[in-house]
Amino acid sequence: MKRPVAYVAGTGKGVPAKVMTNHDFAALGLETDHNWIVERTGIVERHIARDDETTCTMAAEASREAMAKAGVGPGEIDCIILSTATPDRLLPATAVDLQAEIGATRASAFDISAACSGWIYGMTVAEGLIQSGVVETALVVSAEKMSAIVDWKDRSTCVLFGDGAGAVVLKRNKTAHASNKGILSAFMRSDGTLAELLWRPSGGAKVPFSAGVLDDRSTFLKMAGREVFKHAVRSMSEACDRALDGAKLRGDDIDVLIPHQANVRIIEATAKYANISMDKVYVNVDRYGNTSSASIPIALDEAIVSGRVKEGTTALFVAFGAGFTWGSMVIRF
Ligand code: UT7
């Protein structure tokens, strides 16, 4: 494929107002402490949705902001791709609720299930649709209500996650080859043999939801943290290489690394491998926790608002998540 064919025209985020600090877990009777969470993960606080805040409402807030910044009306969106591990219901997709909510009447809309790598997957699919000529303007949204699926009695997982959404308007780049602005490379990979290291064992068609799955807590998210950590570092490192190779760039050429925000120790190890100094890495896991696929577009929106990403910036994005899935992308802004 001759790149770049698509560029980021606008970004937005939708984050619940309610903040839960590490100290607030004591009130849930959980045996944990602020220092453990900070030392092991870098997380200080996370945003938690109210009951009436859903994956769709957070996605809509992020989408409206991204469309406003892109100067694109809902009627101009050809396709909505929504990545989530927490769809508001199993059928139909949350993306169609979002379509109705924002009034994107001309759009096709579908969900992507790729866990924390969902934004990279969604962007890559959107770029392909633009390249093929099917789509001119895509809305790629990642929205996660992780608080609805974590086990609030399991200290090894519930302290890690947060809620939120991020959105990007991706447009065909009509002057792409002249300006060299847009997606310069993309890489995606999965390994389904390792699915049970990070999963929800029940609640789907194989083990349908029943009172029993609440009793045995198998409908909540389970994670073999230490195993996932090792794979995350290895796979994100590989993914950095692949995206850099694809863009014919080296670590030194990257102005900003925006990684999936799961754990600051994973981020540091990935940056070191990619030969990118930490002052070039955007980190906000301290304020949001792990918002799954929403973490990268939330971070990107913040980086643009704060001026860390601006016209001419070359950014590397890298993610890893359940599946396992992983992927990376280089974008020039
Ligand atoms: O986003 C998708 C990908 N997800 C990730 O990338 C997450 C990857 N994994 C991790 O980030 C880390 O493995 C964790 C943060 C989940 C855990 O950190 P760790 O350094 O790997 O700790 P551990 O699981 O080896 O547990 C160390 C100890 C254990 O106690 P013992 O067995 O040594 O006595 C745990 O029971 O820490 C204990 N522990 C806690 N203590 C206080 C586990 N959770 C907590 C807690 N508070 N919340």
Image (tube, helix red, strand yellow):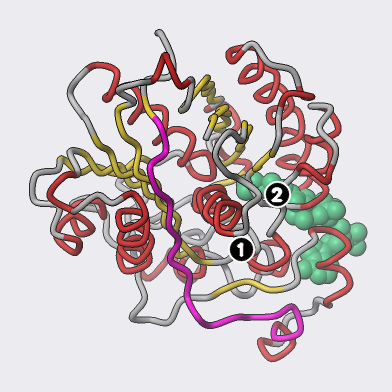
Q: Quadrant of residue 329?
A: top right
What are the residue bounds of the magenta stretch?
Answer: 7-24
Q: Main secondary structure of the magenta part?
A: strand
Secondary structure under badge 2? loop
Earlier in the chain: of badge 1 and badge 2, it is 1
Between 55 and 176, which is closer to the camera in this rendering? Answer: 176
Where does the image place residue 178, in percent across and percent down from the top left? 43, 16
Ligand 1: which quarter?
bottom right
Say which of 198 and 305 sits in front: 305
Residue at left offset 61%, top offset 52%: 303
The residue shown at (79%, 79%) is 31
Confirm whether the magenta stretch covers residue 19: yes
Mark 2 neighbour density, 10 Å: few (under 14) some (14–19) many (20 or more): many
Q: Residue furthest left?
A: 105
Tag of residue 275: none
In this rendering, the answer to whether 188 lies above or below 62 is above
Mark 1 C-beta closer than 8 Å to ligand 1: no
Specify whether residue 224 is in view.
no
Give the labeled residue for mark 2: 282
In percent of the image, x 35 and y 21: which residue is there?
A: 175
Numbered mark located on residue 161 in the image: 1
Q: Nearer the viewer, mark 1 or mark 2?
A: 2
Residue 267 appears in the picture as rendered: yes
How far across and down, in percent of the image, does residue 180 sit? 48, 20
Q: What's under tag 1, amino acid-wise?
A: Phe
Q: Is residue 102 magenta?
A: no
Q: Residues within 10 Å of mark 1 (few under 14, many from 20)?
A: many
> Type of residue at label 2?
Tyr
Q: Position of residue 18 (x, y in %)?
A: 53, 83
